Amino acid sequence: MKSSRLATKLADLRAASSLTQEEVAAHLNVSKAAVSKWECGASAPDISLLPAIAELYAISLDDLFGRSGEMPKDQVDDAYLHALELLGSDREAGIAYVRGQARQHWSCLPLVRMMGLAAFAHVPASEGFDARPIEGDAARLADEAQRLFRRAMALDPHAGPLHPDVAPLAQLLQWTARLDEAKALVEPLVSEGPNLAALSLALLYQEEGQRDDALRILQRQVFTSLVEMQGALNALVPVCDDTYLAEAERFAARLQATPEYVSTSPTLLPVMRFEIAKRAAAAGRGAEALAALASFAEALATCCEILRRPVNAGLFDRIGDLVWDERGKDAQNEGEKAAANLQAAFANQLASDDAWDSLRDTGEFQKLVARLPEVAPRAKA
């Protein structure tokens, strides 16, 4: 900020706070003449005084220097999509854009996080990713993403085990051969057993006759446990054997027997059934693969419908901040886009993965693939 802008800002803040120059000087332990010079632009406060000035006027340092800590969600989304596009088409321009956006909005948590995710998304597709530790462009992007995720964690220090930046940061640390650091990041957040604190708190509320508070606590515990369970099932997909995967899929199907429970983890069954079909196809079990692929297509249809029109279970009527909110036009359009993107991701895997080669010429496989555009039509611009 130029000194004239800072001078105007300081004068305006003092006037808004109804303070005299003498009072500001006394608070900061400087002379009245120094305060006067700041507000006239003849000099600027010593850097060591800036935190005290911000505290005096009850603002952040970002506010003091005219930096906005927040951006509208649509602007964050646009910046993320532009970063993804640039990183894919012009790596140097993409990295410069990510750095520039983060530098300009260093206190905007959503923007910093999304720039980190954009860089993270391109690491596996970059030159040098197959090496361990990763090198080349993959390492450069990983370094950028790590810096941004650490900043996001600093901006959101109380997120605890649900911190969305922990998983990608741990993955980056592993890729860069810092496994001990990755484990040290994650292990303190992993519970060795059930967390009974919520149950204890709910019992306290109940004993005091505060039934609504007890219900809210218990509903939150049930919901978060359900989401965590389904996330763990999803994570099992690439690491378990065929028998375990089939059993896990049957359990997931029981958890998601009705649409309102599909809403708690819409992609769970499509991901599991797609993997079952792919393994069967790769092993030459054609009939089994086709049956699993048909089951996958049904799950994907349900998933995409839920993304467009989510359904909340009555069991969670006291925790509106955790479940799907009322869908306005913008949210509906986002749901359409999410459904279209999900369909496209699966369609691309069917088109490019060698596992499906033995089935490509069969009429049943072609019919199943042809169903996918009907599952998630492209969202309107």
Image (spheres, helix red, strand yellow):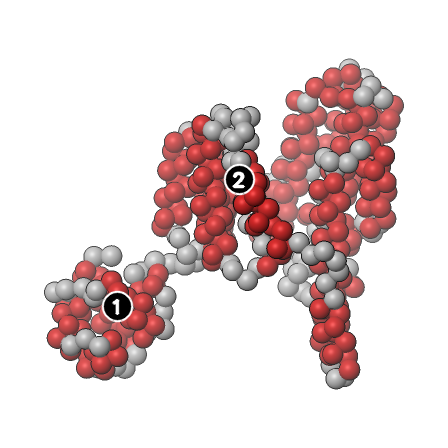
Q: Which residue is mark 2?
A: 178
Indicate whether 335 appears above or below 364.
below
The residue shown at (74%, 40%) is 236
**Left or right of 25, for residue 260:** right
223 to 166, vertically: above or below: below
129 to 209, vertically: above or below:
above
Left or right, 248 with respect to 227, comes to: right
- Provide the secondary structure element on which disc 1 rests: helix
Q: Which mark is first along the chain, 1 or 2?
A: 1
**Residue position for label 1:** 49
Q: Which residue type carries mark 1?
A: Leu
Q: Is residue 296 visible?
A: no
Residue located 57% across and 59% down the image: 159
Residue sitting farthest toward the bottom:
208
Q: Quadrant location of residue 279?
A: top right
The amino acid marked with disc number 2 is Arg
The C terminus - image quarter:
top right
**Residue in the image at 70% along x and 25% along y:** 350
